[in-house]
Amino acid sequence: MIKKEFENLRSNRSIDINADLLVAGGGLSGVCAAIVAARKGSKVVLIQDRPVLGGNASSEVRLWALGATSHMGNNNRWSREGGVINEILLENLKRNKEGNSLILDTILLEKVLEENNIQLLLNTAIYNVEKESERKIKNVEAFCSQNSTNYRVFAPYFCDASGDGVVAFMAGASFRMGAEKKEEFDEGFAPNVEDYGDLLGHSIYFTTKNTDNPVKYTAPSFAIKNAGELPRIKNYTYNNHGCRLWWVEYGGRMDTIKNSEFIKMELWKVIYGIWDHVKNSGKYPESENATLEWVGTVPGKRESRRFNGDYMLSQKDIVEQKDYYDRVLHGGWAMDLHPADGIYSKHNSCSQWHGKGVYSIPYRCLYSKDLDNLFLAGRIISASHVAFGSTRIMLTCAMTGQVVGMAANLCLKNQFTTRQLSEENNVKELQIELNKEGQSIPRLDWKDENDIASQADISVSSELELNQLPENGEWQKLEFSVAQMIPLKKQTLYRFQLKAKASKDCKLNIQFKGSSTANHFTPDLILDNQTLEMKKGEQEIVLCADLD
């Protein structure tokens, strides 16, 4: 038994920790940064202000993690992210084919706990930063609400992967919040702020389940009463998958940090109002036996602060795929902007501009230009609002964390500042080490003197010439244009034979397309165009193409 007499004041327990790297934020970027640094021998403290890891991918938010392949929404079909995030994705695919976010929580926790060099502090919020000089952070202070403990973490290097940039903000780093004007970076995609808005908002998802009997629903008094009049309610179809409701978004005209709780409350009002509309409007009879299973309590936040590095990525870097000497990772998601008014907006739920192929991101975007020992990872890296529309996606964010984990180890080994590592001779070592770990860097012809594989003689015992794609499956109805992508040589005459079945006499237009450069697989060039007369019934088609 513990008995304490009255005291005027008491203090919480206080613990000091010394580390090589402090990582703030336990989303995918922070997790990857911590694991990479730990595996290279650095002592890491990973601080997460939530009870689980994963951030927007966790069971608290339940957003699905995507990257450069854009969920097959563009032509980057082979642009899979490598390194630790690929290791996590493969493990999740093996153990969690149903996509259960609770299982992903455990996989992320397992990966972190298996690293002896990581000290994990969950439910711990950083509330103060101390500096030893104007350009150097000394330590952070944090509080865990679950064990009433104050922590001071001292380290030579810090990584802010917190999403809102809590460490960078308190350390005084320069940042931006909102959209730039078109003229600043010559960005044609920059939005009209007065009409479209400044920031992307938050989303909250919900899931439902069917029962064996009819279920009545009475909405709480705070729920909106006019959900049937929402501009985007026409997008709603009854289903059990909350992730399809990403367009239930709000808050882009506010400060998405200071007003985050207000935005969450407004989203709750909308969510419960939508369910009231579904259950009680009579327009969704298929929901009669359905009940709410889960409503998010933490909003998925898309955008807040973006901090200034020595380089700021912009639209032209993505569209023109500019490759700088210090490129360290790739992105490929569309420049994806959302109207600030979200669910209340008259605009489409998003505007997406897909580039042709993947682009690279320089290391100079991944540290604060104002502080010598602060790395940036995740959605807060140095990018314009338009470029951020692509870099913010979770698997791209994860790769920024992998870069930072490796960079912190090299800085520690060489006693570099974050900026010194960006020098051309120094950043080469970072690129080599990342490549070794499976992080592909676009169009980088890297040479490692210690790589004995480059000295090997390669020979093959046999070759396979592809001359047929066997029939497979049922007939596919051509309700819209379809294509088959195959590797072909230029200046070669090809003959293709295939079967088709027409429901009536008609014309079939066929195009042969290629890519304008070897850097991507976008079929942006028409090489040949043929129109065939089709007769009703099954028939063979013969196509000849001379690909000059």
Image: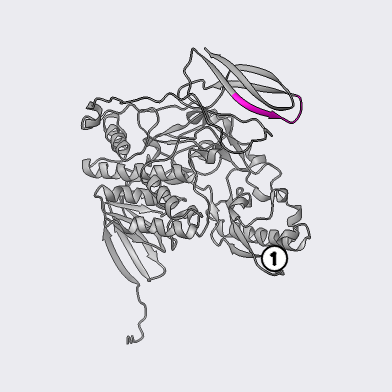
The stretch drawn in magenta includes residue 503: yes
Q: Is residue 276 left or right of residue 38?
A: right
The stretch drawn in magenta includes residue 2: no
Dot 1: what SS?
Answer: loop
Q: Is residue 46 visible?
A: no
Which corner quadrant of the image does residue 219 belong to? bottom right
Quarter holding the N terminus? bottom left
Q: Is residue 448 left or right of residue 525?
A: left
Q: Which residues are magenta?
A: 498-505
Q: Residue sitting at 60 percent across and 55 percent down?
A: 241
Q: Residue sitting at 53 percent across and 47 percent down?
A: 303
Q: Residue sitting at 45 percent across and 50 percent down?
A: 93
Q: Position of residue 149 (x, y in %)?
A: 35, 69
What is the residue that sits farthest to the right in this orientation?
A: 282
Q: Position of residue 159 (x, y in %)?
A: 36, 48
Above or below 336: residue 120: below
- Front residue of 534/267: it is 534
Determine which residue is flagged by label 1: 289
- Front residue of 411/169: it is 411
Above or below 545: residue 436: below
Q: Position of residue 441 (x, y in %)?
A: 38, 33
Above or below 100: residue 184: above
